[in-house]
Image: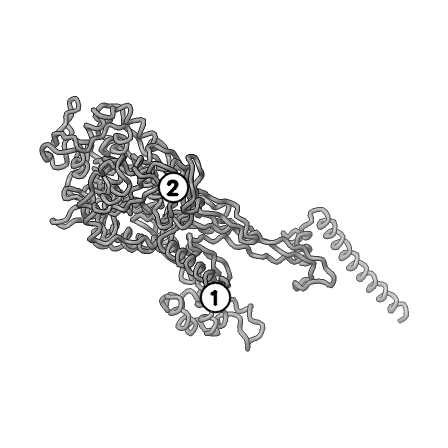
Amino acid sequence: MEMKKHSNTHRGAGILFIVFSLLFFLLFARFIQLQWTGKADGHVLAAKAEQQHKQKRVIEAKRGTIFDRNGTILAQDVPSYTVVAILDPEMTTNPERPRHVVDPETTAKKLAPLLGMDVKDMERILTKKAKQVEFGSYGRNISFELKRKIEALDLPGIAFIRDTNRFYPNGTFASHVIGYAQKNAENETVGKMGVEKWLDRYLRETDGYVSFAGDVNGFRLPEAKERIVKPDNGANVYLTIDGKIQTFLEDAMNNVEKQYKPKKMIGIVADPKTGKILAMATRPSFDPNKRDITNFLNDAISYPYEPGSTMKVFTLAAAINEGVYNGKETFRSGAYKVGPNTVRDHNDVGWGTITFDEGVQRSSNVAFSILVKEKLGEDRFLQYLHRFRFDQKTGIDLPNESVGQIRYRYPIERITTGFGQGTSVTPIQQIQAATAIANDGKMMKPYIIEKVVDPDNGKVVLDHEPTVAGEPITAETARQVREILETVVSSEHGTGRPYQIDGYRVAGKTGTAQIPSAAGGYMTGRENYIFSFLGMAPADDPRLIMYVAVQQPRLDVTETGAAPVSQIFTTVMKSSLQYLHIEPVEKKQTETKKAERRALDSLIGQTAVSAAEQLKEKGYVPVVIGNGKNVERQLPSGGERVLPGERVVLKTDGSATMPDLRGFSLRDAMKVANVLELRPSTKGTGYVVSQSIRPGAEVRKGDYLIVELASPRQWEETMAKKEKEAAERKDNKPHE
């Protein structure tokens, strides 16, 4: 019995030994495998251990915000959420607090209306054999407010994934300027068009993170060191776009689009003193939130076409600058031979023998053919095309700018370029060239980025200043061109009469551009043109310059192409001038000025008293400088055409003293500086509020004169403030 007991014990021990030996060898073999491969069930153990031991939390950065010049937000990152439904029952550990969708029908009835979905469609999604589902575009990019409403339903299994979304609060607003940005495959927001693309390197953000040692549940271990990498937020961008003026333009174009249904529309408003683009819009447009894009190019900078008669502005400027333009000289309108070709006026028959001034007003192709061929010469005219930079891009700070093509190979092309056919240019090229007319000969490079600012420290990382792109003409030429272009709008023969604005003097030129046909030649039909207008106001000292083009509008039988174009121009220009507090001239006074523009008499040699009386009788404002008896210089000079109400500066013999320039326009202040042979320098625009040489002080040739100017409203406020301060000083002065 004892022997049997021993035998069983030894057998059991042997079996246990074998079992443990096998387990040991299996564990040893597994250990060797893990040491050799470093993997278990396809997972890298070192990484798995690090993931459990070391925790990492992402600190989200923000893409830069885009503002207009007034600080209004045009594009920004906003929190967005994606709705998800958890269908896996295993996610629920407590039946009293389910974490999966337990009632698809009820969930669909409550949730579908908030997402704008069909109830049955949602119910089908909620009954799929899946662990987790989404609801397509209906459940993506929802707002925080909608998330709160859904959470209030307290639906089991409905959860949210947080993200950021690029949001454009104004929808279809300067869309081709701002562009859009969207997520790529790596979930990074990348600029795709417009400023979003052009300044993507500044706007783009980099997330930060904090990492620390933690347990398997994610809790930080005691005394564990943490590492923090700060997020790098994208820089904020400020545009030159003025939200108010842009709104005027967008609204006007929307109305014209609805009424006339054109193929394309282009509108640009700029400050000719600086080159800042205050508004820019095209049609067709798009909503960057929806990206319903049919045209991926910004036609204002990327669409070269034959401009038509707006090109005559620069031909006229070249002729005046070269001293070969005589507005009173006559020519025979109607037709003009150029080799085997014949140039005809737009009415085919012309208007008989007329002056060149009337030819400009009537937009005579023959008049401008003569100017190029017989007055300027083709080679000299080509030099002016280069001086106005029609042969190169403007360099505006937007992507995909195109450049037109100067066609100058054949004799007929050289002539037709003078009135806007054959040669192509872009709208932005015309705006840049026209700043020379509006800005007394200085051509300003257009720009749309005001500055780029680091949001974390307020440092300006990119700053744009006005840049002179060239001086193709003199200040006097620019003034004469504006005077003639004003008659295009005001005279009875002017093609620009529809562009008159009550209370404001407008200078400009109409354009009717032919559209090339796919079959060769040009399209025919009264609507198959690009109708345009290039205008500026106020004409004597333009504060705004504007180009509008409308392609192939649907016109009533009684309408011309000027109808949709003038509807945009007059509405936007008048609203913008009023918004900028540019004081209107009384309508009656404006009409008087148009009717009574005439040449000044020479007053040199006359007594100052007599000369001043003569000027007053004719409606001018004399400014007498010096204590002498007789007039030795005057500006404007004798023979120049001057409007009633303008200042005429008279310098007498003897010593000269500085007049009080406060309230003078820049042009009038420069008259004084010219007569006194001073070296002028200006700050700001508008009307003089201060001067470096005090009134009454004796001046000498070559002295420096610095004048500071401000808008009419600012001028009034400054004057009122100075009067108040003077009164307070007087009241506080001790009585004797």
Residue, disc 1: 85
Residue 687 horizontal/vertical position (percent)? 36, 49
Q: Which of 149 and 197 is in front in this view?
A: 197
For the residues labelled 1 and 2, the Cα–Cα distance comes to 52 Å
Residue 115: image quadrant is bottom left
Residue that lies at the very extreme toward the bottom in this rendered image: 96
Q: Measured from the top left, where is residue 477 in percent x and y?
A: 29, 34
Q: Name the residue under label 2.
A: 446
Q: Is residue 104 above or below residue 168?
A: below
Which mark, by number, is residue 429? none
The foreground one among 188 and 440 is 440
Which residue occupies the foreground of this view, 577 or 299? Answer: 577
Residue 393 relative to residue 186: left or right: left
Mark 2 falls on what kind of element?
Answer: loop
Q: Is residue 547 left or right of residue 679?
A: left
Going 32% across and 33% down the picture, which residue do you hit? 473
Q: How crowded is mark 2: few (under 14 residues within 10 Å), some or many (20 or more)?
A: many
Three-letter residue code for mark 2: Pro
Most distant residue in the top direction: 339
Q: In the figure, 525 relative to 287: above or below? A: above
> What is the x, y in percent for residue 287?
36, 54
